[in-house]
Amino acid sequence: MKQWITSPEQYKGLQKGRMNTAQQNLAANTAAFAGSEGKLLHGQGGETLKKLTYGKNSLSWCGCELIAVANAMLLTGHSIPLPEIVFEFEMNKMQLLLPSGYFGTSPKKIRRYFEHKGVPFHSFKRVDELERYIADKDTVCGILSFWNREIKGKGPGRLLFFTKGLHTVAFLKKHSSIYIYNRRNSASSASKYDSISEVIGGRRFILSYVLDEDVKS
């Protein structure tokens, strides 16, 4: 398993610029996040979350994967402050395409975080497989990643699914309902749906991680 870095001392070859950025962000983010520890997070455009920085960008722009991971971990009883998750993602090059964090985090890399935290999970690349897996579970949570642009019709426009970026959210299945955390920038509470398919709608699904731990929250 690839080394997971939680402090600069672990990896002497770490680029100085990236290490400095991560440390500076940790200090500033911790101060800005004070008082929000141990709470489920909604609306990354809100007053608190927009003050946090990932790489060189505000979480209001690129923080959905980080927020989804924090919420999913909290739902399963792991209360890890969001600034610490941001720090570890920066140190371990979890960003999508650019180290500045402009495009957010690579959904495919998120498995590394769960692996190194010892959190068991199943991953899915198809909505139907995900729905079958959670169908007989009364309460379960995880995260979903999907492209924002809705695809309509069968023309060449279907190839432009990526032009509005992607979004990642934490979900909780409780009984027969699906609750989505941070569905929109302005959200102040979880959004309720009847199914994962309803959440995705006409958008292209990327992947999902279902955490195989009991929900605590």
Image (cartoon, grey):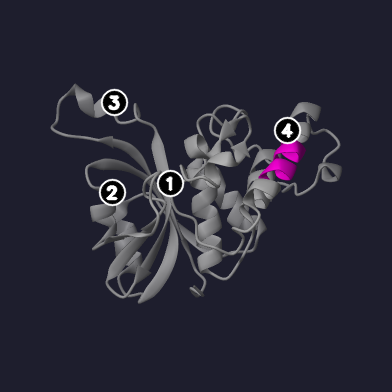
Q: Secondary structure at mark 1?
A: strand
Q: Are marks 4 and 1 in contact (CB under 8 Å)?
A: no
Of callouts 3 and 2, which one flags the residue occurring earlier in the amino acid sequence? Answer: 3
Q: Which mark is residue 21?
A: 4
Q: Secondary structure at mark 3?
A: helix
Q: Nearer the viewer, mark 1 or mark 3?
A: 1
Q: Secondary structure at mark 4?
A: helix
Q: Which mark is residue 160?
A: 3
Of callouts 4 and 1, which one flags the residue occurring earlier in the amino acid sequence? Answer: 4
Mark 4 to mark 3: distance in Å?
A: 34 Å
| Most foreground residue, 193 or 124 | 193
Q: What residue span does the magenta drawing correspond to?
A: 21-29
> Which residue type carries mark 4?
Thr
Q: Nearer the viewer, mark 4 or mark 3?
A: 4
Task: Give the residue at mark 1.
Answer: 168
> Which residue type carries mark 2?
Ile
Q: Exactly how many numbered labels are in the figure?
A: 4
Q: Position of residue 94 (x, y in %)?
A: 60, 39
> Which residue type carries mark 3?
Leu
Query: Which quarter of the picture shows residue 152?
Result: top left
Mark 2 to mark 4: distance in Å?
A: 35 Å
